[in-house]
Amino acid sequence: MDSISIRGGVALQGVVRIQGSKNAALPVLAATLLTEGISHIANCPRIVDVYNMISLLESLGCEARFVADGLSINPCSIRCGAMPSDAVTGMRSSLCLLGALLGSCGEVVMEHPGGCVIGQRPINLHLDALKSMGVDFEEKDGRLVGRTDRLRGADINLAIASVGATENIILAAVAAQGRTMIMNAAREPEIEALCDYLRRCGADIEGDGTSRIIIHGGCRLSGADYSIPADRIVAGTYLFACIATGGNVFLKDAPCGQMRAVLLLAERMGSHIDLSDSGIYVQSRLRPVIPSSLTTAPYPGFPTDLQSAALAAMLRGDGSCIIEENIFENRFRVVEPFRQMGADIEFLSSTSVKVRGVPELEAADVSACELRGGAALIIGGLQAHGESRISGCSYIYRGYENICRDLRELGARITIV
Ligand code: EPU
């Protein structure tokens, strides 16, 4: 189950439906802690990170169950208390429970989420913002303990437009007394998804999608029906898989409006892109054109989560590209496995590489060590001659519902082994 075998060389063809977004679903699930009554969350992706979040919510007193068209959550008997430490440390995004629990119980005790494979990932911005809203934090036996008698609104100017910190502030602010203003807020679509859900529950929030968000706290929140938007990163992964193999694919339900920077890159790589109400049609060249540079940036810039997939699509292209990673310091762990496949990639610094296209890639046995890099290795295998085996695929299942099924539907020779 932990390995995938791929016989490369097939140009992807056909239609693939894009699942709901992981990074939109997780904070929305955490937000249910702040509500009274049942929420019905449609299009919730059935992925390992969502299952972990559900376990955490259950350990806090929520009832959750998948029904035919989504997930039903009832935060009927919320109690604060320690959460299962493996679920917290195994999933960085459990961090959004910080704001939600402080908002619902005034208390949180959780394992320190610590760094992870893609970088150190400090949480200073989360803690400083919540402190300014009246929370006291201390570390006890390696655990982070936060308490507040009364959350109060505050003006918070984020030094970095952090997605997670913006989410935590919003979650705490809807339960706080008074107004919170977040300046230099993250503008990612996942922030808008969280605010859309909270507004449906009765929250008073404006400005999401811009860098200044204003929340008037203290509204009573009911449960609500909400549908998770499609996953722009999964759509981008399949887009780059299509480009890498010279294929023609329709990405059904892909969120075109959230993918401008990604689609621009696809066009620079010689693909023809057609947008429709129901998705994105991609028609790619046999051998992609490699653009001279690519830089990751916060939304609406090119997303860090698709940097390794874009790199994978350039490996057999025509030309060379300097790729700069500006969000996380350790997102080039795919370079070594790609080199094993015969790729020509040179480190210019720890956060930038130069990739030069080679005519062919050879199959190799390689190992995934994180989610997005793992998906990029699959894109490598799809273009390589012979049979590649990718181990460590449990990382990939954290974010992709069924990447093998999806790619097989597009003609790829890919199986779980
Ligand atoms: N940062 C700090 N201090 C903080 C918080 C962040 O220095 O307190 C720094 C980080 O180290 C990083 C930068 O700020 O250099 C941006 O990090 P951000 O907080 O925006 O990222 P995140 O909230 O931890 C989310 C996604 C990531 C995605 C990033 C950037 C979720 C669950 N995770 O992480 O998704 O890469 O935003 O868009 O929403 C993934 O899905 O594979 C993934 C890693």
Image (tube, helix red, strand yellow):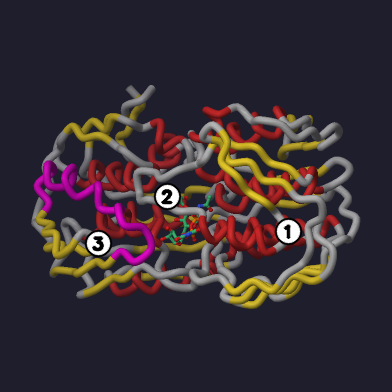
- Ranked by sequence position, the earlier of labels 3 and 1 is 1
**Residue type at the position of mark 3:** Thr
- Quadrant where the C terminus lies? top left
Mark 2: C-beta under 8 Å from nearest atom of ligand 1: no
Q: Nearer the viewer, mark 3 or mark 2?
A: 3
Q: Nearer the viewer, residue 376 or 204?
A: 204
Residue bearing the label numbered 1: 134
Q: Which residues are magenta?
A: 325-343
**Is 287 placed left or right of 275 in the picture?**
left
Q: Is residue 66 visible?
A: no
SS for dot 2: strand
SS for dot 1: loop
**Is 293 placed left or right of 255 in the picture?**
left
- Quadrant where the N terminus lies? top left
Residue 111: percent from left, percent from top: 55, 36
Q: Nearer the viewer, residue 132 or 65?
A: 132
Label 1, residues with CA under 10 Å away: few <14, some 14-19, many ≥20: some
Would residue 250 be counted in the magenta stretch? no
**Structural distance between the alpha carbons of marks 3 and 2:** 35 Å
Q: Nearer the viewer, mark 3 or mark 1?
A: 1
- Name the residue at 77% across, 46% down: 106
Most prominent secondary structure in the magenta stretch?
A: loop
Residue 155: percent from left, percent from top: 69, 74
**Residue type at the position of mark 1:** Gly
- Name the residue at 30% across, 53% down: 331
Residue bearing the label numbered 3: 351
